[in-house]
């Protein structure tokens, strides 16, 4: 049987140990991680007189999609871009997608980098937001691009043109 004095000593030792551990815990408390800075993409201005600068409209059908698909790509001289898609299906209201970001040319390839989709920032490390189109042909009024989903034949539209809703 344990005597009363040994029990008190055991309780005092246990209390002292807990106090010591509590003191260590408060000194080494985990600090919250600092907030990450928002990543940004710096757009590069297009070369002076680049024939890709402008508004390009494509209207057609795409394999696997029911309805007419309208695509408007706005390539600005400062290297920023806007991309809008609109799907029309009979009497149903149109469905749309609006993206913005940067564009540049890599030889005969047009590269679109989305930074915002429908007004929300995107994960800049997700490869789905970088689209590459081979420039098949280009004239003053027509542009043909080849991407993952096939060929996109576009015509030049006037400045300020927007898809009708």
Image: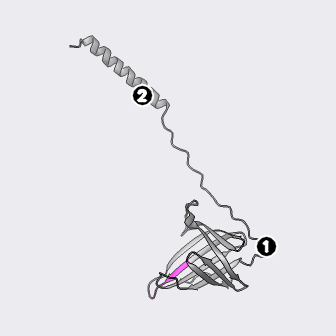
**Mark 2 crowdedness (10 Å alpha carbons): few <14, some 14-19, many ≥20:** few
Residue segment shown in magenta: 85-91
Label disc, if present, on residue 60 of the rendered structure = none
Please identify the quarter of the rendering in which residue 118 is found. bottom right
Scheme of image coloration: one colour
Q: Which mark is residue 48?
A: 1
> Label 2: which residue?
22
Residue positioned 57% across, 75% down in the render: 148
Q: In the displayed structure, does residue 101 sit left or right of residue 92? A: right
Most extreme residue toward the right, as rendered?
Answer: 48
Q: Position of residue 87 (x, y in %)?
A: 50, 81
Q: Earlier in the sequence, mark 1 or mark 2?
A: 2
The correct choice, above or below, for 12 with respect to 75 in the image is: above
Write the residue at 63% across / 74% down: 133
Q: Looking at the image, can residue 24 be seen?
A: yes
Relative to 120, say whether 29 is above or below.
Answer: above
Magenta stretch containing residue 89, yes or no?
yes
How many marks the image carries: the answer is 2
């Amino acid at each position: 049987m344990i005597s009363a004095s040994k029990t008190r000593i055991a309780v005092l030792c246990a209390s002292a140990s807990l106090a010591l551990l509590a003191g260590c815990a408060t000194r080494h408390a985990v600090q919250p991680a600092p907030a990450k800075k928002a990543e940004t993409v710096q757009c590069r201005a297009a070369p002076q007189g680049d024939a890709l600068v402008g508004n390009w409209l494509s209207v057609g059908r795409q394999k696997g999609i029911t309805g007419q698909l309208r695509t408007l790509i706005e390539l600005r001289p400062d290297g920023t871009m806007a991309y809008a898609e609109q799907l029309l299906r009979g009497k149903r209201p149109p469905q749309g997608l609006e993206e913005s970001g940067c564009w540049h040319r890599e030889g005969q390839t047009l590269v679109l980098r989305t930074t915002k989709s429908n007004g929300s920032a995107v994960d800049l490390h997700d490869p789905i937001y970088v689209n590459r189109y081979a420039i098949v042909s280009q004239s003053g009024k027509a542009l043909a691009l080849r991407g993952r989903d096939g060929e996109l034949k576009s015509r030049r539209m006037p400045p300020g043109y927007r898809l009708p809703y």
